[in-house]
């Protein structure tokens, strides 16, 4: 236990020493990767909290809606919770239904089929918008996963080139000569993997949650359209 406590600050000190002895290009790449890591973690934690919150609100709204016998005559308060995906679909569907009814009455051609089609089209549009909302910011994580290892590799290649250039100038090729430069070069690879590995795990976890939420809202949209149609025919 004591050895591990001692080794941790020593390891951190070695990393700091390697960073300080790196060339400016390597230092810039490491700093960029550190910023990437901070950004990736903020996106992962923020997106995870957002998806969990949206799923909880969706289920609460769905339970509340199931308790109502009729949907078309629910009070305005049910259509004012646009921050909830399920409520947004519901609001668009009901508003489209009554808008179609009003236009049909004005034209003297008010049919239940027209009302239902308008409601279903509104549900489809709202559904597409909410799916985009679920997937928002996911592209940034995918970018981190792709770019970070290559950026680390770029730093490594650059550092190795610098090391061999220094060896050619000094005309010596001992391990003492190569070790500092190679260590600095490999530091960028380590930094790239530190960004990429958590990002790919986080991306896969969030992607799975997004797919689950997408399936749930598609099922909800279908059930909502069915309830409106059944209510119209009663």
Image: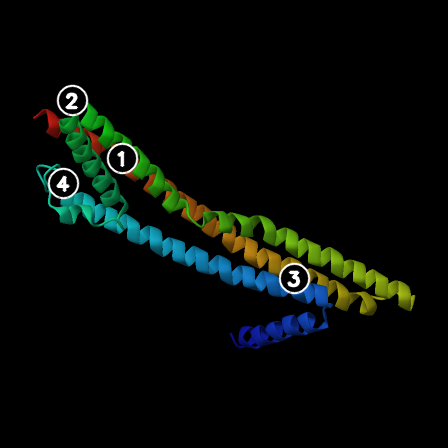
Mark-to-mark CA distance, 1 and 2? 23 Å
Disc assigned to residue 109: 2
Label 2 residue SS: loop
Mark-to-mark CA distance, 3 and 1? 47 Å
Residue 71 horizontal/vertical position (percent): 13, 37
Please state which of the two labelled residues, at mark 1 or mark 2, is closer to the viewer.
Answer: 2
What residue is disc 4 on? 66
Q: Give the image quarter of residue 90.
A: top left
Please state which of the two labelled residues, at mark 3 or mark 1, is closer to the viewer.
Answer: 1
N-terminal of the pair, mark 3 or mark 1, is 3
Mark-to-mark CA distance, 4 and 3? 54 Å
Task: Find out whether the residues at labels 2 and 3 contact each other: C-beta distance under 8 Å.
Answer: no
Task: Please tell me how crowded label 3 is: few (under 14), some (14-19), or many (20+) other residues with Cα within 10 Å.
Answer: many
N-terminal of the pair, mark 2 or mark 3, is 3
Question: Compared with residue 101, is residue 135 higher up or lower down, i.e. above or below?
Answer: below
| 63 sits to left or right of 142 | left
Mark-to-mark CA distance, 4 and 1? 18 Å
Task: Find out whether the residues at labels 3 and 1 contact each other: C-beta distance under 8 Å.
Answer: no
What residue is disc 3 on? 29
Mark-to-mark CA distance, 2 and 3? 67 Å
Residue 168 horizontal/vertical position (percent): 89, 63
| 161 sits to left or right of 28 | right
Task: Find out whether the residues at labels 4 and 1 contact each other: C-beta distance under 8 Å.
Answer: no
Please state which of the two labelled residues, at mark 2 or mark 3, is closer to the viewer.
Answer: 2
N-terminal of the pair, mark 1 or mark 2, is 2
Residue 142 horizontal/vertical position (percent): 52, 47
What residue is disc 1 on? 123
- The one of 82 and 60 positioned closer to us in this rendering: 82
- The one of 165 and 84 positioned closer to us in this rendering: 84
Residue 89 horizontal/vertical position (percent): 25, 40
Quick one: which residue is furthest to the right in this view?
171
């Amino acid at each position: 236990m004591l050895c591990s406590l001692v080794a941790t600050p020593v390891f951190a000190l070695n990393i700091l020493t390697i960073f300080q002895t790196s060339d400016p290009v390597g230092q810039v790449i490491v700093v960029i990767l550190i910023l990437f890591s901070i950004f990736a973690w903020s996106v992962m934690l923020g997106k995870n909290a957002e998806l969990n919150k949206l799923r909880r609100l969706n289920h609460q709204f769905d339970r509340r809606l199931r308790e109502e016998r009729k949907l078309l005559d629910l009070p305005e308060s049910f259509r004012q919770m646009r921050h909830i995906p399920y409520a947004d679909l519901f609001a668009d569907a009901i508003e489209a239904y009554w808008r179609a009814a009003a236009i049909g009455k004005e034209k003297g051609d008010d049919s239940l089929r027209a009302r239902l089609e308008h409601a279903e089209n509104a549900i489809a549009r709202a559904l597409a918008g909410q799916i985009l909302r679920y997937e928002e910011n996911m592209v940034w994580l995918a970018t981190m996963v792709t770019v970070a290892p290559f950026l680390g590799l770029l730093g490594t290649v650059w550092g190795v080139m610098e090391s061999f250039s220094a060896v050619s100038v000094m005309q010596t090729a001992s391990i003492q000569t190569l070790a500092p430069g190679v260590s600095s070069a490999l530091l960028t690879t380590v930094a790239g993997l530190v960004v990429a590995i958590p990002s790919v795990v986080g991306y896969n976890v969030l992607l799975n949650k997004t797919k689950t939420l997408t399936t749930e809202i598609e099922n909800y949209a279908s059930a909502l359209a069915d309830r409106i149609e059944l209510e119209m025919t009663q």
